Amino acid sequence: MIDDDPNIGDALSTMIREMGHDVEYCGDAAGGCSGHKNCSRRWCSSTSAWAERTAWRCLERVREASPGTAVIMISAFGEAGSIVKAMKRGASDFLSKPLEREDVRGAVENVLEKATLQWEVEHLREQVLRGQLERRRSEYDGVFENSPA
């Protein structure tokens, strides 16, 4: 989680830990975004209280480094234009300050549920493809075993 305000960062970290999730907190966009170079996390939360350009750059860097990571943007400026821009650039959700515990809980649960469903679809797709490959192998094995060569 990235937030430039340590009080909000600590409060959000505590809230998310109480929900049963591990949290890594970073107090600036540069450090938080660089931490996603080898990211395999399912989600992260980022505030756009920094200069707007820094927040968008951070969102883009996280999405490039780890396309499967869901990003929840949080801002004190919940203007429609910012929300639309965040979603178009790949944010999974957008919350406006002041934050309500249930809004944070709902956003976290939604992105984790979506990530779980995506994983299940990928897993099932792999199983189907593996099954198709095995069937084709057995068909070809039968052809070669019965050939008069």
Image: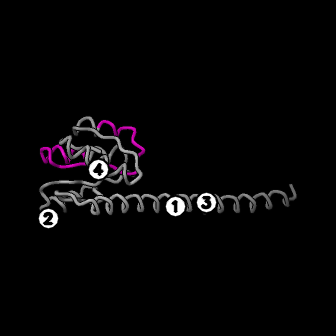
Q: Earlier in the sequence, mark 2 or mark 3?
A: 2
- Amino acid type, label 1: Glu
Per the model, the C-alpha gap separating discs 2 and 4 is: 19 Å
Per the model, the C-alpha gap separating discs 1 and 2 is: 33 Å
The magenta segment is 34-59
Do labels 2 and 4 touch, CB within 8 Å?
no
- Amino acid type, label 2: Ala
Q: Is residue 138 left or right of residue 55?
A: right
Per the model, the C-alpha gap separating discs 1 and 4 is: 23 Å
**Which residue matches tag 2?**
80
Q: Is residue 14 left or right of residue 123?
A: left
Q: Is 11 drawn above or below residue 79 in the view shown? A: above
Circle 1 crowding by C-alpha within 10 Å: few under 14, some 14–19, many from 20: few
**Which residue matches tag 3?**
127
In this view, the residue in front, 14 or 111, is 14
Instruction: Tell me if residue 44 is in the magenta stretch.
Output: yes
Residue 77 has which mark? none
Q: Position of residue 136 (x, y in %)?
A: 69, 61
